[in-house]
Each structure stands twice: as structure tokens, then as C-alpha cells.
Image: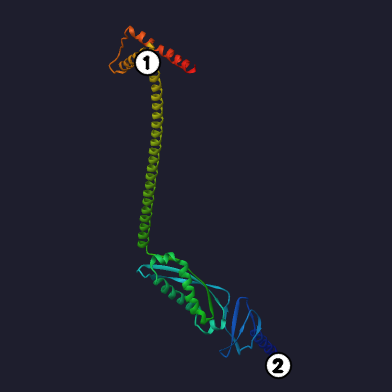
Amino acid sequence: MFEYSIFPIVLAFFALVLILKGVKQVPQGEQWTVERFGKYTRTLRPGLHLIVPIIDTIGHKQIVMEQVLDVVPQEVISSDNAMVTTDAVCFYQVIDPVKASYEVNNLERAMQNLVMTNIRAVLGSMELDAMLSNRDQINSALLIKVDEATNPWGIKVTRIEIRDITPPRDLVDSMANQMKAEREKRAQILLAEGERESAIKVAEGEKRSQILRAEGERQSAFLEAEAREREAQAEARATAMVSKAIAEGDSQAINYFVAQKYVDALGAIAAADNSKTIMMPLEAAGVIGSIAGVKDLIESNKSGQTS
């Protein structure tokens, strides 16, 4: 009697276990493949699903969110025989879970090897200087090549970034010395250009100064010539006036000429370097006083012109 009572309980337990095995809850961001007797039948999307227990099984669980693959650092030889160590990272997303499950075995390992191979191919075709300065170009070339190769696997490669390119230590020191020498060369060139510009400015300033000095001397000579011309004109008028007075028999005009010569002679004596003391003759005052007669001569000439 007891055996008959326990059988339904065991049967119900197994039935519950089968039902629970047939209920599958797929998380958000994942897709599962269902296999029946080892063959793919359908894909389970996020949510609650029922499968036939024992007959149907879950084949592969694929994450369809974007994933990050850290590429193992490796040494690469450039086209100019420089060895560098590269470190990269790859971002990819499973677009077709069926292809990602059944078109390639061990997807992550395949992606790792594929990215490393293409890094060696792209960087190996470049010189070291181009390798260090064209990081964006390298990333773009790698993205195109790897995305094309992984397309049959149902994978979309979104980004490949070269995180670091490290040359050997001796090469880094050589590059640092080369950069230092280049900077010193540029500094010397800038210094030479500055000195040249300074010399040009100084020369232009001297040229301008000479031009202004010449203009000043020319203007001074012109004014001096004009003054001499006026002085000559005045002296000519005075000479003509005195000559006319002499012709008319005026004795004051003769005294004027004598006094003028006497004054010129005294000026020459006073200007001599060895002249410390000048002896004035007694007649000097009389001769110099005769110059006052010129005033009377000029006034008489003016009154004659007025009349």
C-alpha cells in the first residue's frame, strides 16, 4: 500500500523537474541557440521560453552586447628593421549568434590571433617614423581588414585602437638625441634670422639717418647761400651808394672805406692765436668814429630818394 502511495509523488517530482528543465529565461543582451539531437533548430531571444526537455538542449550562449578584447602585446619589425612592442584593444559585437556559434570554433581565440596577425601585417609595412606618427591611419587600416575577415563569423568589429607602440630603449635615446639636435638647429636658425633682421633694421636706420643728415646739410647750405646772396646784395647796394657819394664829392664815403679796412685789419689781429695783448693806436678811435658818418650818408640818401 505504501509503495502505491509513493509512486505518484515520485512521478510528479520528475514531471516538475522536466517542466523546469524545459523553461528557459534568456537575460537581456544575450541570445541562445537551441539544438535538437545536436542540430541547430532555433534561437532564443531575451525573455521566457519553453523547450522540449531532454530532446532540446541549449547549444551556445552568445553575448550580443559590444565586447572588449585585450590583444596580447607582441613585437613587430618595421620596414626599416626597427623592432617595437605593440599593445592594442579590439571592440566587437556579435551580430549573428548562429554564425558566431557554428562558423568558428573558440571565437575569442580566433579574434585574438586574427587581430595580432593583421597588426604585424600593417605595422610591418611601415617605417618607424610613420608608425609613431600615423596612429589614426593604422587604426583605420586594421579596422577594415579585421572587420572584413570576421564578417563570415557574424561579427561586427566596431573599433581597433593601438594603445601603445614602444621602441627599444637605445632607439628611444637615439630619437631623443636627434630631437634635441633638431631643436638646437632650429634655435640657431632663429637666432641667425633675428641677428639678420636686426642688422637690416640697423642698416635701414643708418641709411635713413644719412638721408636726413644730407637733407639737413642741403637745407643748411641753401639757407647759407641765400644769406650770402642777401649779404652780397646789401654790400652791393652799400657800395653803389658810397660810390655815388664819392662821385658827388662827399668826404664821408672815403672815410667809410678807410674805416672798414681798418676794422677788418683789427679783427684779423684779434683772431690770431699768438695775440694775447692788442695795442690800439690813438688814431683808432678817430677812424672808428668816422664810421658814424655812414649813418649820415644813408639818411641823406634816403631823404634824397624821398624828395
**Residue furthest to the top:** 282
Q: Which mark is residue 4?
A: 2
Determine the residue positioned at 35% across, 10% down. 287
Is 145 left, or right, of 260 in this rendering?
right
Quarter-wise, where is residue 261 in the image? top left
Image position of 282 with respect to 151: above or below: above
Q: Quadrant of the N terminus?
A: bottom right
Mark in front: 2 vs 1? 1
Of 57 and 261, the residue lying toward us? 261
Amino acid marked by disc 2: Tyr
Of mark 2 and mark 1, the one earlier in the sequence is 2
Q: Position of residue 55 (x, y in %)?
A: 61, 90
Image position of 178 with respect to 296: above or below: below
Q: How far separated are the C-alphas under marks 2 and 1?
A: 185 Å
Amino acid marked by disc 1: Ala
How is colour applied across the structure in the image?
rainbow
Determine the residue positioned at 38% across, 22% down. 236
Q: Is label 2 in contact with label 1 (beta carbons under 8 Å)?
A: no
Q: Which mark is residue 62?
A: none
Q: Pointer 1: residues within 10 angstroms few (<14), some, or many (20+)?
A: few
Q: Position of residue 293 (x, y in %)?
A: 41, 11
User: According to the image, label 1 marks what residue?
Assistant: 247
Determine the residue positioned at 38% across, 38% down. 210
